[in-house]
Image (cartoon, rainbow, N blue to C red):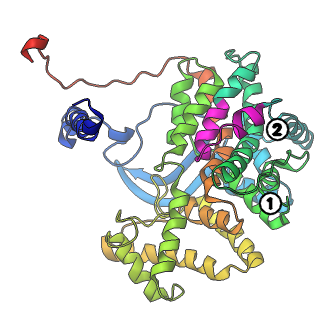
Amino acid sequence: MCLATDFTEYFDHLTQMAYDNNVTAGEVYEKYDVKRGLRNTNGTGVLVGLTRIADVYGYKLENGVKIPDEGRLSYRGIDIRDLVEGFQQEKRRGFEESVFLLLFGKLPTQSELADFNALLDDYRALPPGYTESMILKIPSKDIMNKLMRSVLVLYSHDDDPDNTSIENVLRQSIQMIARFPTIISYGYQAKAHYIDGKSLFIHAPRRGVGTAENVLHMIRSDNRYSRTEAETLDLLLALHADHGGGNNSAFATHVVSSSGTDTYSALAAAIGSLKGPKHGGANKMVIEMVADIKANVEDWSDVEQLKTYLKKILKKQAFDGQGLIYGMGHAVYTLSDPRAVLLKKKAFELALEKNAMKEFELFSNIEALTKELFKEMKGSDVAIAANVDLYSGFVYEMLNIPADLYTPLFAVARVAGWCAHRIEQIVSDTKIMRPAYKNILEPQPYIRIKNR
């Protein structure tokens, strides 16, 4: 069975054994009252910690029953709508202000924000020789994979990598927040050149323009972008900077940080979590779904034709057969996702500039028609709303950002939240996280090899 010609059959045999000896039926979980996915029976999350960083609200609980409500998101107690309105009205960048707020628990003064922006600029460049040896010589077909490996290698460029004092972790955190945009931009250029056969462009980060503009500057061959493009990407980064401690990647950061490990290992774990299609890859699925709609609906501006095809998707008769309208619905938000509401307004502005109003109307119709279909197919009391992924994918597409960078840009934003949660874990909860798993297998006798 170990001959090369028998390998496929043998590996099929191993695969079946691995599956058969690890599968546990759903009713067994119910028997032991296991909270699968850390979810209570009513769909709410199991309470495993406390946080001051961000709050996500999407429903009311009355006698253990979820009652749909308008969604809210707050950073350090400040409503995201107020935060966004503040920096948009004053025509300035908002992502760096959001990062400061998440890390330090207060809004920065004008001088504090200027100093913080200067510090980020000081850290944006990668260590000498790092770009050539780590990124260009070892390109990856997946930029999230490249980001994770690059973060782990930065451990070797740190003179004090294992020191978990808040001063040192804060220094590492600000460096990582500053360097993520450079890593993903160069990682994309390496992939585009060495794997896709395109021209190679390596642009040094610029001072004084912030994170969003640096991303657009570094990924575009001509370095050019409009004010609306920069404002839209900045808004998207601010909206993605954190989403409470209960999301998968933030929780991964808490779990790994609780062991006392280094910042690079903790952030690599968070990146691995975000890379999963159930967490960070949903906006790519939105764009794939919309491309499928355009290919299969003769006139996708016709509401009835579009509704008919969306119904087929929900019935698992079209697209990927999963029965999901990607970009609709959320684990917490019910009546609305405040991030989607804010981003939709900015997407409208960008669509006007890009002459993409027909596409904007398509996304808007998908949102409205999915709500109608859910009420028709699942009952009038069923609530579903667009989540941020519906419009983030559309925005990335209008910004001409390659799909390879959709999830990495999510990481560029969310690293701010990960670092804030890591600091909170180190300061407030010194116990290592060690949840319980119940062994459900009866004791087995050892059988000598000649008798097996």
Q: Can you name the residue that lies furthest to the left here?
A: 451
Towards the viewer: 126 or 348 = 126
Q: Amino acid at mark 1?
A: Ala
Check residue 150 for magenta coloring.
yes
Q: Position of residue 30 (x, y in %)?
A: 21, 39
Residue of label 2: 124
Image quarter hosting the N terminus: top left
Give the spatial CA distance, label 2 vs label 1. Answer: 18 Å
Q: Position of residue 191 (x, y in %)?
A: 66, 49
- Tell me where the magenta segment starts and ends, as one range: 130-151
Dot 2 and dot 1 residues touching (CB under 8 Å)? no
Residue of label 1: 230
Q: Is residue 451 rendered to the left or right of residue 144?
A: left
Q: Residue at x 85, y 45 (%)?
A: 205
Magenta stretch: helix, strand or loop mostly: helix
Image quarter hosting the C terminus: top left
